[in-house]
Image (cartoon, rainbow, N blue to C red):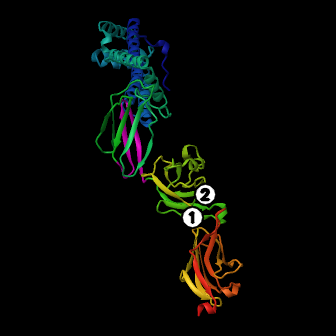
Amino acid sequence: MDAKPDHKNQTQLPPELQDQLKAFQKQLWQVKIAEAILAGFLGLFVSYLLVFGLDRFVETPAMIRLAILLAGVSLFALFAPMMLRRWVWGHREKSQLARLIASKYPVLGDRLLGAVELAKQDANTETLSPALRRAALENVSREAKAKNLEKALPASKKGRLAFATLLLFSAVAMALLFMPDAGVNALKRWLMPLSDTPRYTFARLDNLPKTMVVPYGEAFPLDITLSASSATAPNEAKARFSGKDWIVTEKSRGGGYHFDLPGQQAITFLDVQVGDVIKKIRIEPLIRPSLESLTAIVTPPEYLQQKPRELEVRTGYLSAVEGSQVTLKGTTSRALAELSVGPAIGDNVKAVHANLGAENGIFKAKPDSAEFTLSPMTLTKDSFDLPISWKDMHDLENRDQYKLTIESSEDIPPAAYAQNVPRQRLILEEETLEFEALAEDDWGLKTVGLVWQGQSTLPTDQPGASGEIILKDGGPNARRITENVSFSPKAYGITPQKLTLRVFTNDYYPGRERVYSQEIQIQILTKDQHA
């Protein structure tokens, strides 16, 4: 077996050469460690300033911010260790240093490498002469002493890196000192790219929506207001639809911006830019909510003794008798947020207002409901127009205000007629007078009857005949009654005389007297008078 080398018998490099190599190694390590540290900080400053700069112009996406952070940190986490591994751990041995020196001084480098190998050999080996070995090492030491080994160091970027790092550090410091809100905001968004930290802007806006529901195909306004905390107040704002030209508007005296935007018929996006604020608004066109049906539940006055009626309102006109209660029920094409009723238009509508049952005539619709029911209105003697408007859950209003005309009709007296009979007639007491009794009313007839009053035509102390009969009973819903009448004076014990007949009727209106038809004059004769 080969004998292991005895390190105690190895010839050491001359002290001066060792010191020279150590100094060379120290300088190498100092330069490369400094470069690694500076490069790491440079990457961090560049990545932070990149996020800060991008945020001034656009809403930097979270994934891009994450990529920028990883790229900046990688100089510290990956590049710097690679540099240290190459230049520090890779140049610990004297032979490694000799090879590096050979890149500048090839002859000296080869001799240094040979000297290092010669110093490692065992002095007890018979083929080696210790005196020759020492002489060779001293010769290499003298040759190395005559060279400036610093020139063999790789080109240093420390100065440029230090200058760039100092410059970028100054930029970071200025951003944090002179624009602290923006600087700290960018720092948060850089360090925590996946967080929901909103982008800081020097211009700030109040309540700019992410989605706008607008009337289908109609031009619509957009009003933008600067926030009180806005650091800047740009002189103009601009907006554009996807793929369209910019629409520019100047700042108003009130400090806001007003746009009149063209109508849209499909979902699109609107880009809005005010200073460094860039927003994207989703524009969703919808057809305005419409009234699909309107029904009136009319409860007649109590004296009419009629049940409530449900009437479909189609023409914007409704008529009901005075004193009726009217309840309106409607259905719209979309769920409502608000329903506005009135103010009523007419000569005297105070009573109507008092019965609307809502402050200022505004009703809050049921959540997510397209149906509404108004409080009952008691009709006075005055007719009126009732405007109705509504707003859906998207704040879209009906295009044209709906106006319902409600006519309050008077309960006029009924009418009574005696038909198919002459107004004057001569008859015998046993004859029969035939005619038709007719009564009509808008709301309901109680009865129809016949009344007579006589006047004697002969000298006598007896008064003329008088009486009445009920021809037919009506009812709350009887609006027309006809009855064939056969009147024979003899049947009612009426003697020859002058007799006045009248048809009468009455309705349900409280306190109203009978209504009579025109008179029928009958002259009842004896047979002798007739002859």
Q: Residue pushed farthest front?
A: 459
Tell which circle, 2 or 1, labels the residue nearer the N-terminal end: 2
Between residue 300 and residue 453, name the one nearer to us: 453
Identify residue for label 2.
323
Along the viewing direction, whichever of 109 and 198 lies nearer the viewer: 198
Q: Is residue 33 above or below residue 462?
A: above
Classify residue 72 as left or right of residue 297: left
Instruction: Give the label on residue 513, or none.
Output: none
Dot 1: within a 10 Å radius of its alpha carbon, few (fewer than 14), some, or many (20 or more) residues? few
With 105 as the anchor, is 46 left or right in this view?
right
Image vertical order of residue 343 relative to residue 493, above or below: above
Q: Tag on residue 412?
A: 1
Q: Which residues are magenta?
A: 263-287
SS of the residue under disc 2 = loop
Residue 244 appears in the figure:
yes
Depth order, front residue of 26/22: 26
Q: Can residue 128 be seen from the camera position used here?
A: no
Q: Label 2 is placed on what type of residue? A: Gly
Q: Is residue 256 left or right of residue 359?
A: left
Q: Residues within 10 Å of mark 2 (few under 14, many from 20)?
A: many
Q: Residue at x 61, y 78 (%)?
A: 501
**At which x and y percent is residue 158?**
35, 16
